[in-house]
Amino acid sequence: MTQFTIYINGGSKKVKVDEDTPLLWVIRDELELTGTKFGCGKGLCGACTIHVNGIETRSCQTPIDFLDEDDEITTIEGLSKDSSHPVQKAWIQHDVPQCGYCQPGQIMTASGFLSRNNNPTDEDIDNAMRMNICRCGTYPRLKKAIKSAAKEIQDG
């Protein structure tokens, strides 16, 4: 076991884990931030999506020793303190979740995508979100929410 210091959701945390421990398990088991979900374990479904330096990252496939000392991790808990991020507000407005399990990963993917493209076409949204699976099939509401969040971001 190795001690790591990671910067997560605006603060520094120390954890002692094996070097190949996926960030998902560091986040959930060591730091008790349970918003990030385990889905497939292979990086295919998107339930475990977090941001590392603002880039969407599959935490189930990213070992802790992948991180550099100055890397910044953001989980769904760190996206905003009060669900005031435009994507979170749009998710509520458009009643996107059904079961809700995949939603933290969906929101993290959408917020990362919109940070790079705040005027997306339907095709842009489909391409950005295609690797996030929703078993409940709330894709039409998800697309509406992303468009709504994009508009709020544009309007500043």
Image (cartoon, rainbow, N blue to C red):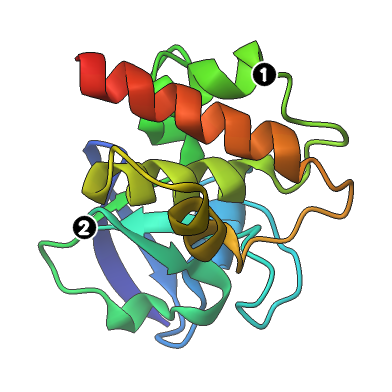
Residue 33 appears anywhere in the view? no
Determine which residue is flagged by label 1: 94
Question: Can you tell which of label 2 and label 1 is closer to the viewer?
Answer: 1
Q: Is residue 91 above or below residue 30?
A: above
Residue at image position (23%, 23%) is 154
The quarter of the picture where residue 55 lies is: bottom left
Taking the image as shown, residue 93 lies to the left or right of residue 99, namely left
Q: Residue furthest bottom?
A: 20
Taking the image as shown, residue 135 lies to the left or right of residue 24, namely right
- Residue 144, image x, y percentages: 60, 30
Q: Check disc 2 and give the amino acid type.
A: Asn
> Please, what secondary structure does the residue beneath circle 1 have?
loop
Of residues 12 and 98, the one drawn nearer to the viewer in this rendering? 98
- Residue 5, image x, y percentages: 24, 61
Taking the image as shown, residue 13 lies to the left or right of residue 15, namely left
Q: Is residue 145 above or below residue 84?
A: below
Residue at image position (72%, 48%) is 102
Q: Is residue 147 above or below residue 125?
A: above
Callout 2 crowding tier (Cα within 10 Å): few <14, some 14–19, many ≥20 = few
Cα–Cα gap, marks 2 and 1: 28 Å
> Please, what secondary structure does the residue beneath circle 2 have?
loop
Say which quadrant the N terminus sits in. Answer: bottom left
Q: Which mark is residue 53?
A: 2
Of residues 131 and 154, the one drawn nearer to the viewer in this rendering? 154
Residue at image position (60%, 39%) is 143
Of residues 103 and 41, the one drawn nearer to the viewer in this rendering? 103
Counting residues from the start of the chain, the first of labels 2 and 1 encountered is 2
Q: Which mark is residue 29?
A: none
Residue 78 appears anywhere in the view? yes
